[in-house]
Structure formats: structure tokens, C-alpha cells
Amino acid sequence: MTTIALKTRSRTDWLIVHCSATRASATVRAADIRRWHLAQGWADIGYHYVICRDGTLETGRPEGAVGSHVRGFNQASVGICLVGGLDPNGKPENNFTSEQFACLHTLLGDLKGRYPGAQIRGHRDFSPDRNGDGKITPNEFIKACPCFDVTQWLASHPLS
Ligand SMILES: [Zn+2]
């Protein structure tokens, strides 16, 4: 097991949604992602939560620890990973199950209750705004992750 100590996070400004970038047919669980991340030499799985294809919520890194999921923002964010996001050819695709979206909605409601000041975004929203128009547009995405528009989804599924 790991001997690298995790650091405690002092603030939570962002709740950041990711995907595992695996095909819809792949039944990936938190234990698998933890194994991949440990193999890269990381202290632990990079995300705090993993939402499996069947909508099961699994815990990753302790919620109060600094994660490893978005460059420059790990000190102030919680990372949530939806399993899936690639089509059979390995291209980005919004192929998450209704159970996953339901679980994400409940989890975000819970987290927002505990971190009322935190803003909810997708990983790709942290790409640089290259043309400086104040919007992160698809041509500027450094990654497709999480393969759907989190802000748009929240607008149509508001947290109560
Ligand atoms: Zn991501």
C-alpha cells in the first residue's frame, strides 16, 4: 500500500465533474482507477468519488484530502468521476446512464449543502480561454472530459 501522505484541503471552491474516459461496455470501479493511479506513482486514486455505470457511488480519496484531478485547482476542489465517456471507437461520447446522472445529482446536492460557496464545473471548463472572450468553447477544450456540458445539464436539472 501507499506510504505517501495525503494533504488536507483547506478550502473547497469547486466541485469538478470528470469521466473515466473508458467505453460504456467497461465495468470500471473505484478500485480499478485506484490501481491505475497508484501505478502512475500517485499517492492514491485522484478522485474523491466514483460513480459506476450502475449508479453506485464509491469513495476514492478521502473527501477532505487534496485530490489529483485538475491541474492548478486540486487545492480547492472535490473531484467526481463518472465511469464511461468513450464510444466504441474511443471517441468522446455522453453515454452515461440515467442511474449515474441520478447519483451525480444527489451527490452534488449533498456536497453543495456542505460547501455552499463551491461552484460546479466540468473538467473541460478549466481549459485556457485562448481567445479571451470569457467563454471556454469546444475548440479550446484541452480535454473532452467529462464529455457533456455540466452547466447546461445543471440548468435543466437544478439542485433543490
Ligand atoms: Zn477529467
Image (spheres, rainbow, N blue to C red):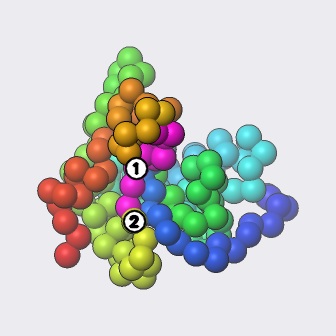
User: Residue placed at 42% from the left, 22% from the top?
Assistant: 90
The kind of residue on which mark 2 rests is: Gln
User: Residue placed at 54% from the left, 64% from the top?
Assistant: 77
Q: What is the number of the mark on residue 122?
A: 1
State which quarter of the image contains the C terminus: bottom left
**Disc 1 to disc 2, C-alpha distance:** 10 Å
User: Residue placed at 36% from the left, 68% from the top?
Assistant: 107
Tell me residue 113's x, y (percent): 36, 81
Badge 2 element = strand
Number of other residues with Cα within 10 Å of mark 2, as a class: few under 14, some 14 to 19, many 20 or more = few
Q: What is the number of the mark on residue 119?
A: 2
User: For residue 65, what is the image quadrant?
Assistant: bottom right
Tell me residue 146's x, y (percent): 40, 42
Q: Is residue 121 magenta?
A: yes
User: For residue 74, what is the image quadrant?
Assistant: bottom right
Mark 1 Cβ inside 8 Å of ligand 1: yes
